Image (tube, grey):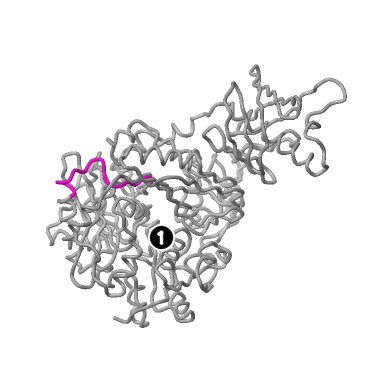
Amino acid sequence: MKRFDKVLVANRGEIAVRVIRGATKLGYKTVAVYSEVDRAALHVREADEAVCIGPAPAKESYLVIDKIIAAAKLAGAQAIHPGYGFLSERADFAQAVQDAGLIFIGPNPPSIEAMGNKSASKIRMLAAGVPCVPGYQGDDQTDATLVAESIKAGLPVMVKAAAGGGGRGMRLVHEESKLLSDIQSARSEASNAFGSGQLLIEKAVIDARHVEIQVFGDRHGNVVHFGERDCSVQRRNQKVVEEAPSPAVDQTLRLKMGAAAVAAAKAVDYVGAGTVEFLLGKDGAFYFLEMNTRLQVEHPVTELVYGVDLVEWQLRIAQGEPLPIAQADILDNRFGHAIEVRLCAEDPRQNYLPQTGSILRWQAPSGDGVRVDTYLESGSSISPFYDSMQAKIIAWGEDRETARSRLLKALEDTSLLGVVSNRDYLRAVLATDAFASGDFSTGFVGQFFSQDRIAQERPSATQILLAAVALYLDDAAQLTSEHQLSSEMIGWHSSHETPADFQLRWNNSDYEVEVQVHEGRRFEARIGDETVVVDAEWSSAGEFRYGSGGVRKLARYARDTQALWLDAEDRIERFVDRTYAAAEVAAAGSDGRITAHSDGKIVAVHVKPGDTVQKGQTLVVLEAMKMEFQLAAPLDGVVEAVSVEAGLQVKGRQLLVQLKPQ
């Protein structure tokens, strides 16, 4: 094979940074590609060279094969690494790269084609003797056939997009009455996400675990595996927590599943990094789900447990080298336990609504066994055009409990302020007794973190006190610094001491807070009948230490024009100072205004002016961060105006539909 020394990374975000750094460590020159919105992104600055490939929407930049290949030729890159997502599992992309005389750092196009369609791959695996979940993967894709096959398989069933992954186009259906609507919804989401609406039906294996095997093949016919990863903690079929090894897999089962995964890879002459995913039943039986023909998001846990660099392996295999380690040595090298969580820009308390905006403060954790893969920086922005995952926080330990404890501390030390994230949700997941025990299934989130429970959870009002103190302290400190005043002037009055009144909004509720300053750094805050004395010390911009009841703690904070973001008391919360705010308008939706809940793209508009609608009826479908959201009528009414159409990009809070209440 022709050897290469310059690699173009056809991706963005944390995986682009990960691959660029890995390639640079081995001495390769690197080329980044970027959309116009990513011009100043970290992966662009980390690479030796960078090429702009178009506007922000992925369909006009990162998903355009011709632009990627043109960028490689322009920069003189001889090889292309796809990362994951985007074009990474597109056989036509791999073929186009090879047709252009370049090296695709991944499997050959026929292997991707064989495993890229879930229906076709399942048929192939059945022929190869790999155990599969019963269901339907036929060519007849009519709604009637899929409904009938679902009933035949026996509810509950999984409706799955044949051409995709990541939980898109996937529905778990328990009731026959919902089959048709869920099939149609899955087809629509699959078409928008993957360009194909083909679906398959699988019998749902209840209380199973999601266990996957990392495989690696070279161009000399060798295939090995790196044991398993457990990805059972999932929400909407998207992984939340991943770990290696699985608490449910012993050495005997590991060898059986590993052998099945290797057989699956050999059945398609697999080359490079891949993952064979299985459902593992309580009885130890396992069933093939799919094969991901790329590097996985969760590859760091395997790297930490087996002491390897999988990106290095990808590069070496792409150069035509044989696998560097034999199977027996790989298994002998396994040591310790690693757990990874996905830090996402989403609001768990609002049904995981994707979040966008400017990052006011980003602080990554560090320490023994801690690893962070991210592209985040303070001052950068999270856009609506790409995936909601922003970082991966990983911890390794000699045993599972050490890894879990280290990861909990790492999350405590992680600060993402300015955009709502799932950090606190991840900490809550890791802290449950069920997760600590290792005894759980893919039903974990539904069992312990239902949406009703999350939405109703109310943190202690003590944090309101801390917000008031931080708000007052920050203002006062800035004033004393700007005017070169002594800190003793903070809270000074010419007569008797008088408290400052604040009205802070937190979690859609308003709190009256009185803050009185004594001797510059000592604060007394009153909320209702509760009074708390706090000693605060402003140490640096964005941080202060405070003490109450003999315990001193650290708080981090950031402010924008409207809100105070506070990371304290093991939570990140957002507060709005409404002390001098004007009177508010009617509650959202009560005036008949249907607005976008976030930046995104309009996928469908189901109404027109003059239509009569009922409360709960879907009016508009909005796509944000690769997910679809049904925007429903908040009341009965008549459509007065429709301000958008399918395909239009909209901003958060933009008016979409105006209703006249009945």
Q: Is residue 348 rendered to the left or right of residue 85?
A: right
Residue 487 x %, y %:
77, 34
Q: Is residue 201 visible?
A: no
Q: In what element is the residue under mark 1?
A: helix
User: Closest to the observer: 252 or 546?
Assistant: 546
x, y percentage for residue 206? Answer: 24, 40
Q: Residue furthest top?
A: 529
Q: Which segment is the magenta one?
A: 240-254
Please identify the quadrant where the C terminus is shown.
Answer: top right
Number of numbered discs overlaid on the protein picture? 1
Quarter of image, res 100: bottom left
Residue 643, image x and y in percent?
Answer: 60, 56
Q: Residues within 10 Å of mark 1 (few under 14, many from 20)?
A: many
495 left or right of 15? right
Question: Disc 1 designates what residue?
Answer: 193
State yes or no: residue 601 in magenta: no
Up/down of 188 relative to 317, above or below: above
Could you tell me which quadrant the N terminus lies in? bottom left
Q: Nearer the viewer, residue 544 or 39?
A: 544
Residue 119 image-quadrant placement: bottom left
Point 65% across, 16% down: residue: 529
Q: Residue at x 14, y 46 (%)?
A: 252
Residue placed most toward the observer, 629 or 502? 502
Q: Is residue 537 above or below residue 323?
A: above
Residue 422, position in %: x, y?
Answer: 48, 43
In the rendered image, is residue 429 in sight?
yes
Looking at the image, residue 552 lies above or below residue 87: above
User: Which residue extends farthest right?
Assistant: 494
- Inspect the image, locate mark 1, and give the three-letter code of the amino acid beneath it: Ala
Give the quarter of the image for residue 87: bottom left
> Does residue 438 appear to the left or right of 559 in the view shown?
left
Q: Nearer the viewer, residue 611 or 404?
A: 404
